[in-house]
Amino acid sequence: MRLLNTDGSRFKRNLLRDRQLYLMLFPCILYYILFYYVPVYGIQIAFKDYQPYVGILQSKWVGLKHFKSFFGSPYAFRIIRNTFLISFYSMIFTFPLTIILALLFNELRCKWFKTAVQTISYLPYFISTVVVAGLVVSFLSPTAGIVNTVLEKMGMEKIYFLIKPEYFRTIFVAMGGWQGIGFGTIVYTSALCSIDNTLYEAAAVDGVSRWKRIIHITLPGIMPTIAVMLIIRMGSLLSVGSESIILLYQPITYETADVISSYVYRNGLVESNYSYAAAVDLFNGIISLVLVVISNMLSKKIGGSGIW
């Protein structure tokens, strides 16, 4: 009992002392409660034939009916394959480039040039996805697009890229990489600032080349951050943003462009098949959770660090 009283009084003192920090944290906590935890209540519609005019509690319970319907449909394998491949290609090409770009920024010695280059690389991230998709459509236009204009000048035939299923994944990954790589370096730049400069100074005195300093000092110094970011990326391996997909794809490119998020959007919001869409999205969330757990276990076993 005395221990409980001591812990309670200590908590009150800490709460009073850091009240301003807790007040700053409160909106963030409230956001997650309202938009992430409260909606969990609605997951049960994945196991019901949900009717909006009846309500969640009064809707008929059907168990795994919608899950069986999804896995029995001819689209299940296609959208899972497309989601995995697009996410995998994005991770393979953009994840290493983000680290490489952060290392290059770290090696720049001219401060004003470094600041200017970093700022320019961050800017695409703050451009609306709608605007970026519009730029892609304009650049790839078969009539006046700059890409087809160059192809025509080189004596090649124009290509309508956005109706060719074989080009969609490349276009999507390139667009996402251009928009997000620069901003993604912020985390690694922060991690690089935590590395002790005396290590670099000692290595320079010993005549170690800049390349070896990167290999033996810089990369090991940010390896825990890389591991955490990789775990987060693995958790979103089946979570491709629907905004860019919906803005770029067409029915003719569904073969390679249709992913889980766009499929859920069409079934849930367009066709009002709420229970079926919730079941598909719940399946996506479960797989993402499993991937996070597996990635965290492998990270702790190989690198000794993880999220928990």
Image (tube, grey):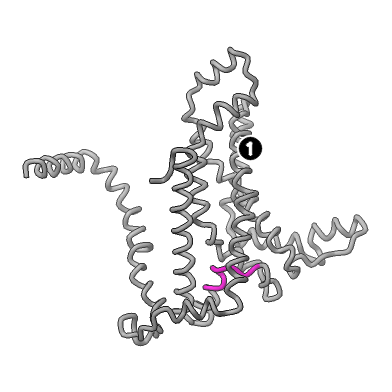
Magenta highlight range: 257-264
Q: Which residue is mark 1?
A: 117
- Residue shown at the point (59%, 34%) measured from the top left: 115
- Residue shown at the point (65%, 26%) measured from the top left: 211
Q: Residues within 10 Å of mark 1 (few under 14, many from 20)?
A: some
Indicate left or right for 165 with 29 as reference: right
- Residue shown at the point (49%, 72%) measured from the top left: 280
Residue lying furthest top: 205
Residue lying furthest right: 155
Residue 294 in the image, given as x and y percentages of width and height: 46, 52
Q: Nearer the viewer, residue 229 or 266?
A: 229
Residue 113 in the image, given as x and y percentages of width and height: 64, 31
Q: The residue tagged with tag 1: helix, strand or loop?
A: helix
Q: Quadrant of residue 19?
A: top left
Residue 223 in the image, given as x and y percentages of width and height: 51, 36
- Residue shown at the point (63%, 33%) measured from the top left: 104
